[in-house]
């Protein structure tokens, strides 16, 4: 490494404009070096950010932010933008409690127009902003940067349909690196793949919509980028596309060669070798889910597996390698994935559809309309349900129970441990007769209780002298047992049950709950409409009104943070719960 003399701690958007265009390549080299240095210490989305170093510098050199508007799709390619907008030191706190989130975050900076991390939003946001400037007679520009993976999203295609007929100052940068997390898939990907720098080939896709199109050009040649941006800007009268080719992970060739998936997101790593210097503390739930799915595909030659570009985070990379003829990665097409599964089900083929739960929010209508109204046997497995730790506020899945359990015909299961997750996936697939969702948290073996405990499928017996009942779900099962034992030490007896059957809810458990004077519900989700509401509804139906204490998250968008940090902040840890019991039920005599 050499001295990074061109980089300052408090650079703003105008800082880069002081350099001559000939100095920009060296500035980009230093930015890339600093970026690798920071992310090797924090972990994060290293690959895509290395791919947009030159683009980000060129955009700040050409346009005037924050007056001009810049939207990123997806919002995790924003690290260099943060460095150039006074947030270099904040980037060094990336993915830490109370630190900077690894995505665009409007509360952090006026340079981030929106808080965003889901694919498919930038074109609609950009068009609305550009038309708004036109209405307000603002002589300003709007730039939407969209990856080739995000372009597959249905909402992106809807936006293009509208963009084609508008006349406003909107520039679309198509950042084409041929990858989402894994390699992209489908006809659009194949079309863009054929369009290479310096190869004369007629453009037909965007031109058929009469959207002006330029490129492809080298997205790592900052001088070429600046010259092309200046040229387009000088005559920008209607939405225009600039197609650039970039390499995800440019500057970290070792990691690119050894594991392209690692370049999407990575733990802390050695910047010279690319090897991890940090690793997961134990085996995650996704591994057990993936193993169960592999067993199903091996046993049932008609079983099929579908996912929208989340193979690695849902543990199914090996399944795709072993059974390529029955595995379908449809790229970032979440809505299509679930309805594709419905189509398989109509033919008597049982599909498994794997999601990250945060992206499953995009497919409410498809689950509701295409699968559940038709009562089709589709097995959906959604990982990372609940709080996702040091991910962004936009990545948490805290409303899963709230929005899913209101859908008729939908069976919802939340296994209590990693072992149960494996057995439940296999059992539910074998017996699949109706729409079924299995949820599991962003967790690992160490998040499971380390002792035997009761779940709602067991024989339920009220302990002698017990006055209360603790009902928990997901990662709160371990916490629930801690509260139970802490109360026992004070001769206050509460039974504990881990609830796994969310819908339909167990009549046996619902009747059993009425035997208690006190009930505590514990969930890693928004209380409103969630697990606590489910318990209250069943009690009311049975005209049972015990004293209840609801433990969970408030109706607000929850920040990122480790599970311990979030639990303590929102009074969800065992010590906070004991204090709450003492406060609301003084008659129990909790010390």
Image (cartoon, rainbow, N blue to C red):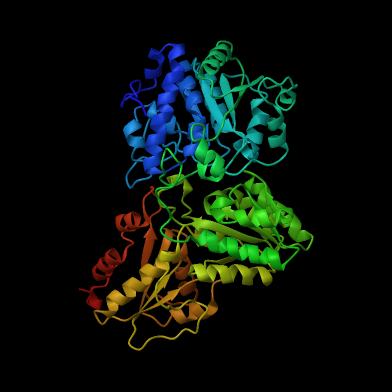
Camera-side residue of 269 and 458:
269
Q: How many marks?
A: 0
Q: Splitting the image into 4 quarters, where does residue 472 fall? A: bottom left
Q: Using the rendered image of the protein, determine whether residue 75 is visible from the camera's viewpoint.
A: no
In the displayed structure, does residue 299 sit left or right of residue 181? right
- Residue placed at 43% from the left, 33% from the top? 79
Spot the residue most to the front: 273
In the displayed structure, does residue 563 sit left or right of residue 175? left
The image position of residue 212, as x and y in percent, is: 67, 19
Q: Quadrant of the N terminus?
A: top left
Q: Quadrant of the C terminus?
A: bottom left
Camera-side residue of 518 and 391:
391
Spot the residue most to the bottom: 464
Query: Compared with residue 308, is residue 371 higher up or lower down, i.e. above or below?
Result: below
Q: Using the rendered image of the protein, determine whether residue 506 is visible from the camera's viewpoint.
A: yes
The image position of residue 508, as x and y in percent, is: 52, 80
In the displayed structure, does residue 518 sit left or right of residue 589? right
- Residue placed at 58% from the left, 48% from the top? 362
Query: Compared with residue 237, is residue 343 higher up or lower down, i.e. above or below?
Result: below
- Residue placed at 67% from the left, 50% from the top? 337
The image position of residue 302, as x and y in percent, is: 75, 63
Query: Compared with residue 543, is residue 273 higher up or lower down, i.e. above or below?
Result: above
In the displayed structure, does residue 121 sit left or right of residue 462? right
- Residue placed at 33% from the left, 42% from the top? 99
Camera-side residue of 425 and 92:
92
The image position of residue 336, as x and y in percent, is: 68, 48
């Amino acid at each position: 490494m050499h001295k990074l003399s061109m980089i300052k701690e408090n650079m703003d958007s105008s800082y880069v404009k002081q350099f001559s265009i000939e100095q920009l390549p060296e500035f980009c080299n230093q930015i890339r070096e600093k970026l690798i240095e920071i992310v090797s210490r924090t972990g994060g989305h290293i690959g895509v950010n290395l791919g947009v170093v030159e683009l980000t510098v060129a955009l700040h050199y050409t346009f005037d932010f924050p007056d001009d508007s810049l939207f990123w799709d997806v919002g995790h390619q924003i690290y260099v933008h943060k460095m150039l907008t006074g947030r270099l030191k904040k980037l060094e706190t990336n993915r830490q409690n109370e630190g900077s989130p690894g995505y665009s975050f409007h509360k952090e900076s006026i340079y981030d127009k929106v808080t965003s991390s889901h694919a498919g939003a930038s074109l609609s946001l950009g068009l609305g902003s550009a038309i708004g400037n036109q209405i307000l007679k603002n002589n300003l520009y709007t730039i939407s940067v969209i990856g080739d993976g995000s372009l597959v999203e249905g909402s992106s295609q809807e936006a293009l349909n509208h963009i084609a007929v508008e006349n406003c100052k909107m520039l679309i940068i198509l950042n084409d690196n041929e990858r989402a997390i894994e390699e992209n898939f489908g006809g659009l990907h194949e079309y863009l793949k054929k369009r290479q720098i310096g190869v004369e080939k007629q453009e037909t896709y965007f031109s058929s919509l009469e959207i002006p199109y330029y490129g492809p050009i080298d997205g790592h040649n900052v001088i070429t980028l600046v010259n092309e941006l200046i040229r387009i800007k000088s005559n920008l009268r209607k939405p225009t596309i600039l197609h650039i080719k970039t390499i995800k992970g440019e500057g970290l060739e070792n990691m690119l060669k050894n594991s392209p998936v690692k370049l999407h997101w990575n733990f802390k790593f050695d910047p010279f070798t690319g090897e991890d210097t940090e690793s997961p503390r134990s085996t995650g739930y996704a591994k057990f889910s993936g193993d169960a799915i592999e067993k199903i595909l091996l046993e049932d030659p008609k079983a099929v597996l579908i996912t929208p570009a989340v193979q690695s985070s849902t543990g199914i990379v090996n399944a795709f390698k072993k059974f390529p003829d029955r595995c379908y990665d449809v790229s970032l097409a979440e809505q299509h994935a679930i309805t594709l599964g419905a189509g398989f089900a109509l033919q008597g083929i049982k599909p498994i559809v794997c999601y990250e739960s945060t992206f499953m929010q995009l497919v409410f209508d498809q689950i509701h309309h295409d699968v559940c109204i038709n009562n089709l046997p589709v097995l959906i497995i959604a990982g990372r349900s609940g709080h996702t730790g040091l991910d962004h506020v936009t990545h948490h899945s805290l409303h899963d129970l709230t929005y899913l359990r209101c859908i008729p015909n939908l069976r919802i299961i939340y296994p209590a441990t990693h072992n149960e997750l494996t057995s439940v996936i296999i059992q539910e697939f074998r017996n699949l007769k109706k729409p079924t969702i299995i949820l599991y948290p962003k967790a690992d073996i160490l998040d499971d209780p380390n002792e035997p405990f009761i779940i709602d499928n067991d024989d339920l017996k009220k302990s002698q002298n017990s006055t209360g009942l603790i009902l928990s779900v997901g990662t709160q099962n371990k916490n629930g047992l801690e509260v139970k034992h802490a109360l026992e030490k004070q001769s206050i007896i509460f039974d504990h049950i881990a609830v796994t059957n969310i819908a339909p809810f167990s009549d046996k458990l619902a009747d059993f709950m009425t035997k208690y004077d006190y009930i505590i519900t514990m969930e890693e989700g928004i209380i409103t409409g969630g697990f606590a509401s489910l318990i209250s509804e069943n009690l009311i139906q049975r005209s049972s009104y015990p004293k209840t204490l609801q433990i969970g998250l408030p109706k607000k968008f929850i920040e990122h943070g480790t599970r311990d940090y979030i639990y303590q902040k929102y009074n969800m840890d065992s010590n906070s719960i004991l204090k709450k019991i003492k406060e609301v039920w003084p008659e129990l005599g909790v010390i």
